[in-house]
Image (cartoon, rainbow, N blue to C red):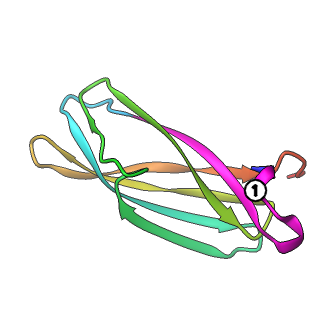
Amino acid sequence: MESESEPEENRFVFAYTVTIRNTGDVAARLLTRHWIITDANGKVQEVKGEGVVGETPHLKPGEGFQYTSGTMLETSMGTMGGSYQMVTDDGEEFDARIPDFLLTTPRTLH
């Protein structure tokens, strides 16, 4: 988000959109999130918390939930990935892995 970034202060703000889809046979609720965010210098931030954007969505089979959030790095490029901790209506807990994705400013070569 160029309008909120201050490159001269090593402050780069990124927005990202995630879609979560229940591809299983049982409804499940997202309980917590765990992000690992790494900037281009190798600095790692670990973020854990309840739900996403103030919600703990309950997804029936085939349903999805989309949200947009943001993060800040000290470099113009980085990666982000992690997992959501879920529980099915049957009480089974599991981690839904989030593959790493790239955070980059529009004019960054990589």
Magenta region = 3-20
Residue 59: x and y, percent? 27, 33
Tally of numbered discs: 1
SS class, disc 1: helix
Against 52, residue 25 (above or below) is: above
Q: Residue at x 61, y 74 (%)?
A: 44
Against 26, residue 41 (above or below) is: below
Q: Crowding near pointer 1: few (<14 within 10 Å), some, many (20+)? A: few
The verdict on residue 5 being magenta is yes
Residue 76: x and y, percent? 81, 60
Against 5, residue 88 (above or below) is: above
- From the viewer's side, name the closer residue of 9 and 99: 9
* Outermost front residue: 3
The residue that label 1 is drawn on is: 4
Residue 53: x and y, percent? 43, 50
Residue 20: x and y, percent? 41, 37
Q: Residue at x 67, y 76 (%)?
A: 43
Q: Is residue 98 left or right of residue 76?
A: left
- From the viewer's side, name the closer residue of 63 and 14: 14
